């Protein structure tokens, strides 16, 4: 027998199917008819999930789920309509059966509860192992889609009376966004104002920090249970891009599960450690990706390669660094206005890398040195600006 994906099961009305999925919602059993309903998702389904209704002879025979995020395997369930909703019906009297498994990465394949008929096969173990690893890294998220995230809470802040931000990180880098030309100036961060430096110094300086926007009352109630440094699984987050910046929001089916830090260490695609309140990498990811042929030709060749977050959180006011960045916007846009009334270049740029966005200014001699163009050669200046902006 084979397992159907959740999205395929939603189209299999009146058929008997086998399913395996992550539990995202649990209803309490009803004693009147010995039934309960769970909701499951899998990596290929971006909706709110598929309800699975269990009917048994006794309350004890119903699934007793230990935690949201655990995995259930059901066999010979019938896809039916219940209250106009597509539902998988697992009826003990019609040869349906199930097995409940811990959702944590790296644990065994023994169900903590199962029907008497349940027997796990080697193929089931492979599916179970894959489903335990079905959490998306930040580097693999896609705009306009829902995914499960396994991450570390870096910071939580209340910006407005009715809006909170959760800052999360998993050691990987968010995909670069396509920046469309916009008349207004691009913001430096998702939140209305950048956090003060003393807070940013608690952030990791490599990898991207994602902002999760929380506005609903029910979601805000859960925030009071969260603290920086906690590892969590977030099921069914919705990812979007605004003004070239990634953010995420809760969906009606978003669920949260605490995890152990050692589980996060096993999952993280990069080695990382925590030094006091500060995160640091065991290796410099930027230095590794720059070849010697590309690292020359810039000023201050003795300066270290760092991320923009390193610069934002540096303890001295003045310092020299080298960074690999993307120019995403410059002001003024009109090259004819690039020089002031004295003929000096005066330019403000918005730069970004995977860790942050910053403003950078060029003025007078520094601008001449940077562009290396003759004052009268306007065409060469336009070409260099276009190259900087990816044109």
Image (cartoon, rainbow, N blue to C red):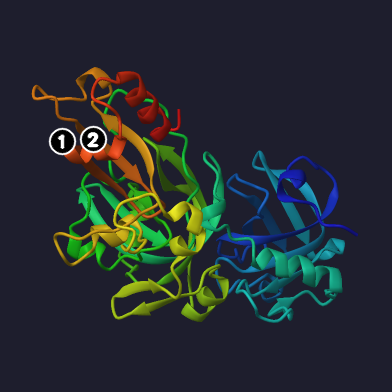
The residue furthest left is: 342
List x then y, in percent, for residue 163.
Answer: 27, 48
Q: Residues within 10 Å of mark 2 (few under 14, many from 20)?
A: some
Left or right for 291, reference 83: left
Q: Is residue 232 visible?
A: yes
Q: Is residue 74 above or below residue 373?
A: below
Q: Which of the two residues, 64 or 344, is positioned nearer the viewer here?
A: 344
**Which type of secondary structure does the marked residue at label 2 adopt?**
helix
Q: Residue at x 18, y 57 (%)?
A: 196
Q: Residue at x 35, y 48 (%)?
A: 213
Left or right for 385, reference 267: left
List x then y, in percent, for residue 318.
Answer: 15, 59
Left or right for 73, reference 146: right
Q: Where is the N terminus found, in terms of image quarters?
A: bottom right
List x then y, in percent, for residue 13.
Answer: 80, 41
The residue furthest right is: 1
Q: Is residue 349 above or below residue 5?
A: above
Q: Which of the two residues, 7 or 60, is positioned nearer the viewer here?
A: 7
Marks 2 and 1 close (CB-CB < 8 Å)? yes
List x then y, in percent, for residue 158.
Answer: 23, 54
Q: Is residue 127 above or below residue 195?
A: below
Q: Is residue 112 above or below residue 384?
A: below
Q: Residue at x 61, y 62 (%)?
A: 23
Q: Which residue is mark 1?
A: 364
Q: Is residue 156 visible?
A: no
**Which type of secondary structure does the marked residue at label 1 adopt?**
loop
Q: Which of the two residues, 95 or 250, is positioned nearer the viewer here?
A: 250
Q: Where is the C terminus found, in terms of image quarters?
A: top left
Q: Where, by quadrant of the figure, is residue 52 drawn?
A: bottom right
Question: What label sits on residue 368 in the rendered view?
Answer: 2
Q: Residues within 10 Å of mark 1 (few under 14, many from 20)?
A: some
């Amino acid at each position: 027998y084979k397992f159907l994906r959740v999205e395929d099961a939603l189209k299999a009305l009146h058929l008997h199917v086998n399913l395996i999925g992550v539990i995202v919602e649990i209803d309490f059993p009803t004693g009147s008819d010995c039934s309960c309903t769970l909701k499951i998702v899998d990596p290929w389904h971006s909706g709110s999930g598929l309800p699975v209704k269990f009917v048994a002879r006794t309350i004890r025979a119903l699934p007793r789920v230990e935690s949201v995020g655990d995995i259930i395997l059901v066999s010979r369930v019938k896809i039916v309509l219940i209250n106009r909703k597509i539902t998988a019906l697992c009826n003990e009297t019609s040869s349906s059966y199930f097995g409940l498994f811990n959702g944590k990465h790296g644990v065994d394949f023994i169900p903590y509860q199962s029907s008497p008929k349940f027997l796990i096969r080697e193929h089931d173990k492979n599916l179970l192992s894959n489903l335990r690893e079905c959490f998306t890294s930040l580097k693999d998220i896609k705009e306009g889609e829902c995914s499960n995230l396994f991450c570390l809470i870096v910071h939580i802040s209340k910006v407005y009376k009715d809006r909170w931000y959760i800052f999360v990180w998993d050691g990987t880098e968010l995909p670069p966004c396509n920046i469309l030309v916009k008349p207004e100036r691009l913001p430096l961060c998702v939140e209305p104002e950048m956090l003060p430096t003393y807070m940013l110094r608690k952030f990791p300086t490599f990898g991207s920090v994602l902002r999760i926007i929380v506005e609903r009352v029910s979601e805000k109630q859960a925030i009071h249970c969260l603290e920086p440094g906690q590892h969590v699984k977030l099921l069914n987050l919705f990812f979007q891009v605004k003004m070239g910046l990634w953010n995420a929001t809760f969906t009606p089916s978003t669920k949260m599960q605490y995890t152990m830090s050692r589980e996060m260490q096993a999952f993280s695609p990069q080695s990382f450690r925590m030094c006091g309140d500060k995160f640091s990498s065991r290796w410099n990811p930027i230095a590794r990706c720059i070849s010697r042929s590309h690292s020359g030709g810039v000023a201050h060749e003795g300066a270290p390669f760092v991320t923009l977050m390193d610069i934002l959180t540096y303890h001295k006011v003045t310092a020299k660094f080298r960074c690999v960045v993307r120019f995403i916007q410059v002001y003024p846009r009109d090259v004819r206005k690039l020089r002031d009334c004295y003929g000096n270049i005066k330019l403000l740029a918005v730069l970004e890398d995977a860790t942050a966005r910053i403003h950078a200014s060029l003025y007078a001699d520094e601008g001449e040195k940077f562009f290396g163009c003759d004052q009268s050669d306007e065409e060469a200046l336009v070409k260099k600006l276009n190259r900087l902006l990816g044109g």
